[in-house]
Image: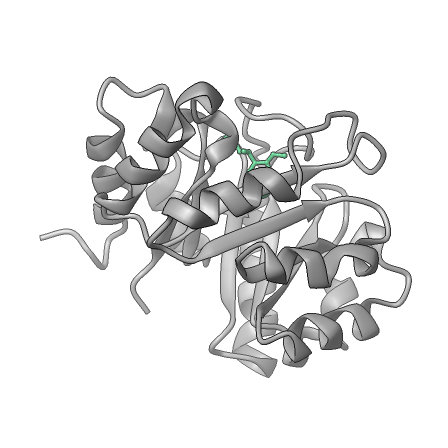
Amino acid sequence: MNHLIAPSILAADFANLQRDIELINKSDADWIHVDIMDGMFVPNISFGFPVVNAVNKYATKPLDVHLMIVDPDRYLNNFKEAGASGMTVHYEACPNLHRTVQHIKELGCRACVALNPHTPVAVLEDIILDLDMVLIMSVNPGFGGQKFIENTYKKLKDIKALARRYNPELYIEVDGGVDMSNADKLLDAGANVLVAGNSVFSAPDPLVAITNLKKSGSGSRS
Ligand code: DX5
Ligand code: ZN
């Protein structure tokens, strides 16, 4: 499968959000990654439903909503209404993960589970068949612009091996510190969705940065 690019609007200019959404609309990006932080599961607070609604009003690409919040079940319906096409919940935040995943699917959304850097992929063995996507965090969640954690490659290989066995169609997303210095290696290790915040929006030309990420990977090179 050709890999997908999901720019994270956490790194966008919130005073010019419409402009930055329209930039993503006309780019080679596939999804728009929307980071929700509650100040509890992670030490930071990002934004809530009114902002997601506003993004959805201008976005022409699917919203990939990453919920870094405790007890996300409380808000799944709201995020669906706000325009989510896929929803990611954290393994570490969901004691009844199977129920949460079924709820996301009943809402007609792509169901994804994220793993923090310290959580081994083996914990997903008995639910991977029910998932549309797994998100491997390559930084500790909570902030953009952090340093990429090298152990991510090993985890991508591990989840790819599980996916081959149980769910070959699984999307494998990687999030945190993704840029042109590691994109090829991440794709080789098994990722097929790259999230990028800082490396896109701090680039001299974000459109070019997105195109370069889209062209990454040995399969796509001419
Ligand atoms: C981190 C978020 C990421 C973040 C990535 O908690 O989940 O999506 O926006 O930002 P960069 O690409 O700057 O590391
Ligand atoms: Zn994210």
User: Quadrant of the image for the N terminus?
Assistant: bottom left
- Residue 124 image offset from top left, x and y in percent: 73, 67
Residue sitting farthest toward the left? 222
Give the number of marks: 0
Q: Residue at x 77, y 49 (%)?
A: 119
Left or right of residue 78: residue 123: right
Left or right of residue 210: residue 222: left
Asked whether residue 135 appears in the rendered view, the answer is: yes
Q: Residue at x 61, y 60 (%)?
A: 81
- Residue 138 image offset from top left, x and y in percent: 59, 39
- Residue 165 image offset from top left, x and y in percent: 58, 81
Relative to 109, residue 155 above or below? above
Identify which residue, 72 or 93, lies in the foreground.
72
Quadrant of residue 212 within the rendered picture = top left
Q: How is the image coloured?
A: one colour
Q: Residue at x 56, y 73 (%)?
A: 163
- Residue 200 image offset from top left, x and y in percent: 35, 29
Instruction: Give the image quadrant in which the ligand numbered 1 is located.
Output: top right
Left or right of residue 47: residue 205: left
Asked whether residue 158 appears in the rendered view, the answer is: no
Q: Residue at x 76, y 55 (%)?
A: 75
Identify which residue, 144 or 168, lies in the foreground.
144
Residue sitting farthest toward the right? 95
Quadrant of residue 104 within the rendered picture = bottom right
Relative to 194, residue 158 above or below? below
